[in-house]
Structure formats: C-alpha cells, structure tokens
Amino acid sequence: MLLTVLAACAPLPAAGSPIAIESVWARSSPAAADTAAFYLIIRNSGAEEDALTGARSAACRAVELHESYQAGSGMMGMRPVSGGAIVLSARDKVELKPGGLHIMCIGKQVDFRAGVILSLTLQFQKTGDQIVEVEIRE
C-alpha cells in the first residue's frame, strides 16, 4: 500500500507528454454524502498551451470541472468552470485545491474512506487521456 500511496504523490507524466500530474487526493467523506472533490497539481512543461477538458472515474456517476466562488452574503458557492475547461499555459502549473478549482465527483459509487486509492482519468485537449491514482485522505 505504501508504494501505491507514494506513486499517487509523485509527478506522473505520460510518455513524451509535457503534462505532469502531482499530489492527487480527495477528502474522506461519509458513505451518505453524494459528492466529493478531487484535488491535484498539473504542470505543463511544454511550449504550447493545453487544457483539462474533463475527467471520468468509475467511482463517480458523473465528473465535472468546478470552481469555487464568493456568492452573496459571504457564502461560498461552486459552479462548472467557465468555458468547460481549465487552461494550462505553457511552462506553468495549475493547482486544483479546496476553495478554488477542483474536480467534482457527483453520485459517489464507492465509499471515500481514508487510505482508499481510486482511479481517475484526466482528459486533456492536446495531450489526451492520463490515468492517475487518487489517495483518499482524512
């Protein structure tokens, strides 16, 4: 299990890809909770812009790219990202984190217990699909 968790934390570039994925995780949540969020860092070492256009996982009925925003009365809200994609500038990184950009799991199909490792496929406009492992944390 330790090797699996370490693999989930290391950058994972696809062969020949300028895109590397690191620190992929989600919070544990009770089985009764219908949704969860995935967080990660995406590095684009390439000379061209790319974009994360979607994701999928057998652990979720649906997966959407979301952003948090300041709603009225000091409340935070969530909504799908504008334009349906997260743009990755050349030679830059994007962090998906609590309170910001994230990947939303809607209709959880499994229990998100600490220590569980899930598979998540990230879909990039130019690079194509990259499969990563998600570590569920407390």
Image (cartoon, rainbow, N blue to C red):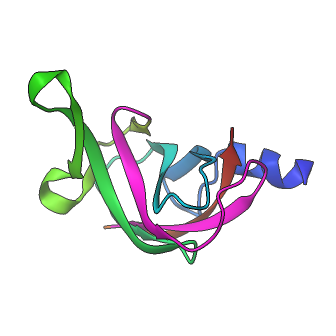
Q: Residue at x 74, y 48 (%)?
A: 114
Q: Return the residue found at the far left.
A: 72
Q: Quadrant of the N terminus?
A: bottom right
Residue 4: percent from left, percent from top: 83, 55
Image-based side of 23 in relation to 66, left or right: right
- Residue 8 or 15: which is nearer the viewer? 8
Look at the image and tell me whether residue 51 can be seen.
no
Look at the image and tell me whether residue 89 can be seen.
yes
On whether residue 120 falls in the magenta region, the answer is yes
- Residue 35 or 104: which is nearer the viewer? 35
Q: What stretch is highlighted in magenta?
A: 98-124
Q: Which image quadrant for residue 78?
A: top left
- Residue 25 or 74: which is nearer the viewer? 74
In the figure, 128 relative to 8: above or below?
below
Q: Which image quadrant for residue 94?
A: top left
Q: Return the residue found at the far top.
A: 74
Residue 16: percent from left, percent from top: 56, 62
Residue 81: percent from left, percent from top: 21, 52
On whether residue 112 falls in the magenta region, the answer is yes
Q: Quadrant of the C terminus?
A: top right
Residue 80: percent from left, percent from top: 22, 55
Count of numbered circles on the image = 0
Q: Which residue is drawn at 46% across and 63% down?
A: 34
